[in-house]
Amino acid sequence: MRIISGQYKSRKIIAPKSLPVRPTTDMAKESLFNIINNLFYFDDISVLDLFAGTGNISYEFASRGTENITCVDQDYGCIKFINETSKSFNMSIQTIKSDVFKFLEKSTLQTNIIFADPPYDFSDELFAKIPELVFTNNLLLENGLLIVEHSKHTDLSQLPNYSYSKSYGGNVFSFFEIT
């Protein structure tokens, strides 16, 4: 994987094969950040990266100037890799080793963007639980955005606060907003 734009543009990041991850493809990530770039100033926002995996999305935000980034993942290897990588790039990324659902149930952290990239084989109920917890617990700031990445075989359009989706190959980003 590589960083698409910003201070660390074109830097490659090689994650250990032992991590239980499926990083967002560069093509999908570039398209996603084109959308986000039209909605936010990167140096003015805070980001919560759920099911952070390798930290791929967080590195992209940090490279573009976002300084307030929190990653949540339950895998120790993923958290360790994010900590090591962000330190090597001098990025200010905070990590929390936790089950994402337990974190969302207890968190009071409010951010501008929440990005969630859960396993594609999640049940519809588990996918639905993400926006439910985010909006029930008021975790988005005003004009904030929840983005859930999933496969083209999952449809989240019937969930509350759903706004729209964008597809890139087998990847889909569903956007949720405060209504």
Image: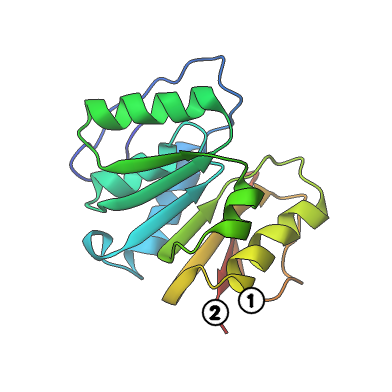
Please state which of residues 32 and 148 is positioned toward the viewer in this rendering: 148
Amino acid type at mark 1: Asn
Q: Position of residue 73 (x, y in %)?
A: 54, 38
* CA distance separating discs 1 and 2: 6 Å
Q: Position of residue 138 (x, y in %)?
A: 54, 73
The vertical placement of 12 against 16, above or below, is below
Labels 1 & 2 near each other (Cβ < 8 A): yes
**10 Å crowding of disc 2: few (<14), some (14-19), many (20+):** some
Residue at the image position 72 percent from the left and 69 percent from the top = 157
Quarter containing the N terminus: top left
Asked whether, in this view, residue 151 is left or right of residue 41, the answer is right
Amino acid type at mark 2: Ile
Residue at the image position 54 percent from the left and 15 percent from the top = 17
Q: Which residue is mark 1?
A: 161
Location of residue 95 (image quadrant): top left
The vertical placement of 43 against 161, above or below, is above
Quarter containing the C terminus: bottom right
Q: Which residue is mark 2?
A: 178
The vertical placement of 3 against 36, above or below, is above
Please state which of residues 79 and 24 is positioned toward the viewer in this rendering: 79
For the image, the number of numbered tags is: 2
Location of residue 42 (image quadrant): bottom left
Q: Position of residue 144 (x, y in %)?
A: 44, 72
Name the element at disc 1: loop
Let me know if residue 163 appears in the view.
Answer: no
Residue at the image position 65 percent from the left and 64 percent from the top = 133
Asked whether, in this view, residue 92 is left or right of residue 22, the answer is left
Which of the colour schemes (rainbow, by chain, secondary structure, one colour) is used?
rainbow
